[in-house]
Image: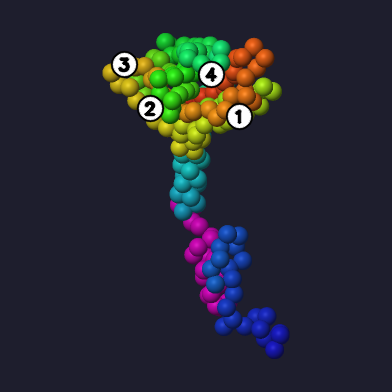
Amino acid sequence: MNLHRAGCQEEEVTCPCPGCDARLLRKGLDAHVQATHLLSPEKQLQTLWREVARLRAKSESEQHLAVASPTSFIFNWHADGWGDGHFQSETCDLGDGVTVNCVFQSRSSDPEHSHFIGYGIKGRAKCKVHVTLSILDKHDKVLRSLPDIGTAAAPSEQVEPDFKVLSGWGREFTPTAEEKVQSERADGSIRLRAVVRLFLDAAP
Protein backbone atom coordinates (compact mmCIF):
# COMPACT_ATOMS: atom_id res chain seq x y z
CA MET A 1 0.00 0.00 0.00
CA ASN A 2 2.84 2.35 0.85
CA LEU A 3 4.55 1.62 -2.46
CA HIS A 4 1.31 2.29 -4.30
CA ARG A 5 0.62 5.51 -2.43
CA ALA A 6 4.13 6.86 -3.18
CA GLY A 7 3.30 7.07 -6.87
CA CYS A 8 -0.51 7.07 -6.93
CA GLN A 9 -1.75 9.54 -9.52
CA GLU A 10 -5.06 10.02 -7.71
CA GLU A 11 -3.52 11.20 -4.41
CA GLU A 12 -3.85 14.88 -3.52
CA VAL A 13 -0.47 16.57 -3.10
CA THR A 14 0.87 20.08 -2.49
CA CYS A 15 2.84 21.85 -5.19
CA PRO A 16 6.57 21.60 -4.32
CA CYS A 17 7.46 25.01 -5.78
CA PRO A 18 8.47 27.61 -3.14
CA GLY A 19 5.66 29.98 -2.25
CA CYS A 20 2.95 27.91 -3.93
CA ASP A 21 0.34 26.29 -1.68
CA ALA A 22 -1.74 24.77 -4.47
CA ARG A 23 -3.15 21.31 -3.74
CA LEU A 24 -4.04 19.04 -6.67
CA LEU A 25 -3.99 15.41 -7.79
CA ARG A 26 -0.51 14.07 -8.51
CA LYS A 27 -1.51 13.32 -12.11
CA GLY A 28 -2.05 17.04 -12.69
CA LEU A 29 1.14 18.21 -10.98
CA ASP A 30 3.35 18.34 -14.08
CA ALA A 31 0.80 20.38 -16.02
CA HIS A 32 0.39 22.77 -13.10
CA VAL A 33 4.14 23.35 -12.76
CA GLN A 34 4.53 23.81 -16.51
CA ALA A 35 1.68 26.32 -16.74
CA THR A 36 2.30 28.21 -13.52
CA HIS A 37 5.99 28.08 -12.70
CA LEU A 38 7.83 27.44 -15.96
CA LEU A 39 7.25 30.75 -17.70
CA SER A 40 7.87 31.59 -21.30
CA PRO A 41 10.52 34.29 -22.02
CA GLU A 42 7.70 36.82 -22.49
CA LYS A 43 6.20 35.96 -19.11
CA GLN A 44 9.63 36.00 -17.47
CA LEU A 45 10.18 39.54 -18.83
CA GLN A 46 6.78 40.66 -17.56
CA THR A 47 7.60 39.24 -14.14
CA LEU A 48 10.95 41.04 -14.16
CA TRP A 49 9.33 44.37 -15.03
CA ARG A 50 6.76 43.90 -12.28
CA GLU A 51 9.58 43.32 -9.79
CA VAL A 52 11.43 46.42 -11.04
CA ALA A 53 8.23 48.47 -10.61
CA ARG A 54 7.74 47.09 -7.10
CA LEU A 55 11.29 47.96 -6.06
CA ARG A 56 10.98 51.45 -7.57
CA ALA A 57 7.72 52.05 -5.68
CA LYS A 58 9.37 50.83 -2.47
CA SER A 59 12.31 53.18 -3.02
CA GLU A 60 10.01 56.15 -3.64
CA SER A 61 8.02 55.26 -0.53
CA GLU A 62 11.20 55.14 1.56
CA GLN A 63 12.29 58.50 0.17
CA HIS A 64 8.86 59.95 1.08
CA LEU A 65 9.18 58.61 4.61
CA ALA A 66 12.63 60.18 4.91
CA VAL A 67 11.21 63.56 3.88
CA ALA A 68 8.21 63.15 6.17
CA SER A 69 10.20 62.07 9.21
CA PRO A 70 9.98 64.50 12.11
CA THR A 71 12.60 66.95 13.29
CA SER A 72 12.72 66.81 17.08
CA PHE A 73 13.46 69.59 19.53
CA ILE A 74 13.85 69.28 23.29
CA PHE A 75 13.23 72.49 25.22
CA ASN A 76 14.25 72.80 28.86
CA TRP A 77 13.54 76.16 30.46
CA HIS A 78 12.54 77.59 33.82
CA ALA A 79 9.99 79.88 35.42
CA ASP A 80 10.49 82.00 38.51
CA GLY A 81 7.81 79.97 40.26
CA TRP A 82 4.09 79.20 40.17
CA GLY A 83 3.07 82.83 40.55
CA ASP A 84 1.97 85.17 37.77
CA GLY A 85 4.38 85.45 34.89
CA HIS A 86 5.20 84.67 31.27
CA PHE A 87 8.33 82.60 30.66
CA GLN A 88 9.69 81.69 27.25
CA SER A 89 12.26 79.10 26.21
CA GLU A 90 15.13 79.60 23.83
CA THR A 91 14.22 79.76 20.14
CA CYS A 92 15.37 77.18 17.58
CA ASP A 93 15.88 78.52 14.08
CA LEU A 94 15.10 76.07 11.26
CA GLY A 95 16.08 78.51 8.53
CA ASP A 96 13.87 80.10 5.87
CA GLY A 97 12.26 82.21 8.57
CA VAL A 98 10.88 79.23 10.52
CA THR A 99 11.42 79.20 14.29
CA VAL A 100 10.19 77.04 17.19
CA ASN A 101 9.99 77.88 20.88
CA CYS A 102 7.94 77.15 24.00
CA VAL A 103 6.19 79.17 26.67
CA PHE A 104 4.89 78.82 30.21
CA GLN A 105 2.34 81.22 31.64
CA SER A 106 0.59 81.40 35.00
CA ARG A 107 -2.77 83.17 35.28
CA SER A 108 -4.16 83.74 38.76
CA SER A 109 -7.26 85.30 37.17
CA ASP A 110 -8.41 81.80 36.16
CA PRO A 111 -7.98 79.52 39.21
CA GLU A 112 -9.55 76.50 37.49
CA HIS A 113 -7.03 76.58 34.64
CA SER A 114 -4.36 78.67 36.27
CA HIS A 115 -1.37 77.63 34.17
CA PHE A 116 -0.58 77.16 30.52
CA ILE A 117 2.36 75.42 28.84
CA GLY A 118 2.69 75.27 25.08
CA TYR A 119 4.76 75.90 21.99
CA GLY A 120 4.85 78.24 19.04
CA ILE A 121 5.99 77.79 15.44
CA LYS A 122 6.52 80.88 13.33
CA GLY A 123 7.03 81.04 9.60
CA ARG A 124 4.64 78.25 8.63
CA ALA A 125 0.93 78.47 7.99
CA LYS A 126 0.53 74.71 8.37
CA CYS A 127 2.40 71.88 10.02
CA LYS A 128 1.98 68.55 11.79
CA VAL A 129 3.33 68.01 15.28
CA HIS A 130 3.61 65.57 18.14
CA VAL A 131 4.34 67.45 21.37
CA THR A 132 4.99 66.17 24.89
CA LEU A 133 4.80 68.76 27.69
CA SER A 134 6.16 68.05 31.17
CA ILE A 135 6.79 69.61 34.57
CA LEU A 136 10.05 68.43 36.19
CA ASP A 137 10.71 67.75 39.85
CA LYS A 138 13.71 68.92 41.88
CA HIS A 139 15.84 66.13 40.40
CA ASP A 140 14.94 66.91 36.77
CA LYS A 141 12.67 63.88 36.53
CA VAL A 142 9.20 64.18 35.03
CA LEU A 143 6.76 65.10 37.78
CA ARG A 144 3.73 65.56 35.55
CA SER A 145 3.24 64.81 31.87
CA LEU A 146 0.34 66.60 30.27
CA PRO A 147 -1.69 64.85 27.54
CA ASP A 148 0.30 64.76 24.33
CA ILE A 149 -0.65 66.90 21.36
CA GLY A 150 -0.93 64.41 18.52
CA THR A 151 0.87 61.07 18.45
CA ALA A 152 3.89 59.69 16.65
CA ALA A 153 1.63 57.69 14.32
CA ALA A 154 -0.99 60.43 13.88
CA PRO A 155 0.56 63.86 14.41
CA SER A 156 -1.77 66.78 15.04
CA GLU A 157 -2.26 69.16 12.12
CA GLN A 158 -2.17 72.85 13.03
CA VAL A 159 -3.21 75.59 10.63
CA GLU A 160 -3.11 79.41 10.83
CA PRO A 161 -3.51 80.45 7.18
CA ASP A 162 -3.93 84.18 7.78
CA PHE A 163 -0.93 84.90 9.96
CA LYS A 164 1.63 82.16 9.31
CA VAL A 165 2.16 82.08 13.06
CA LEU A 166 1.31 78.85 14.85
CA SER A 167 1.22 79.95 18.46
CA GLY A 168 -0.79 79.42 21.60
CA TRP A 169 -0.99 75.65 21.14
CA GLY A 170 -0.57 73.71 24.36
CA ARG A 171 -2.31 72.58 27.54
CA GLU A 172 -3.93 74.31 30.48
CA PHE A 173 -3.70 72.74 33.92
CA THR A 174 -3.76 73.48 37.63
CA PRO A 175 -0.89 72.10 39.75
CA THR A 176 -1.69 70.47 43.05
CA ALA A 177 -0.19 71.66 46.31
CA GLU A 178 1.98 68.51 46.42
CA GLU A 179 3.24 69.14 42.89
CA LYS A 180 4.22 72.67 43.83
CA VAL A 181 6.26 71.37 46.77
CA GLN A 182 7.94 68.64 44.71
CA SER A 183 8.78 70.93 41.80
CA GLU A 184 10.07 74.10 43.46
CA ARG A 185 13.84 74.44 43.64
CA ALA A 186 15.77 76.07 46.46
CA ASP A 187 15.53 79.43 44.70
CA GLY A 188 11.76 79.02 44.18
CA SER A 189 12.05 78.37 40.43
CA ILE A 190 10.51 75.46 38.53
CA ARG A 191 11.74 73.58 35.46
CA LEU A 192 9.73 72.77 32.35
CA ARG A 193 10.30 70.49 29.39
CA ALA A 194 8.75 70.16 25.95
CA VAL A 195 9.60 67.69 23.21
CA VAL A 196 8.36 69.09 19.90
CA ARG A 197 8.40 66.77 16.90
CA LEU A 198 7.78 68.80 13.77
CA PHE A 199 6.80 66.79 10.69
CA LEU A 200 8.13 68.47 7.59
CA ASP A 201 5.80 66.86 5.03
CA ALA A 202 3.05 69.48 5.50
CA ALA A 203 3.00 72.36 3.04
CA PRO A 204 4.69 75.55 4.29
> Given contact means CB atoms under 8 Å apart, are the residues at marks 4 and 3 in contact?
no
CA distance separating discs 4 and 2 = 29 Å
The local crowd at label 3, few if under 14, some if 14 to 19, many if 20 or more residues have their Cα within 10 Å, is: few
Q: Can you identify the residue that label 3 sits on?
A: 163
> Disc count in the image?
4
Q: Residue 178 has which mark? A: 1
Q: Is residue 92 visible?
A: no
The local crowd at label 2, few if under 14, some if 14 to 19, many if 20 or more residues have their Cα within 10 Å, is: some
Quadrant into which the N terminus falls: bottom right
Indicate which label's residue lies in the foreground, 4 or 3.
Answer: 4
Nearer to the camera, 152 or 18 = 152
Indicate which label's residue lies in the foreground, 2 or 1.
Answer: 1
The amino acid pointed to by label 3 is: Phe
| Bounds of the magenta segment | 24-42
Q: Main secondary structure of the magenta part?
A: helix
Q: Residue at x 39, y 30 (%)?
A: 157
> Given contact means CB atoms under 8 Å apart, are the residues at marks 3 and 2 in contact?
no
Query: Within the image, what quadrant is residue 6 found in?
Result: bottom right
Nearer to the camera, 204 or 12 = 204
Q: At which x and y percent is residue 135?
A: 57, 25
CA distance separating discs 3 and 2 = 13 Å
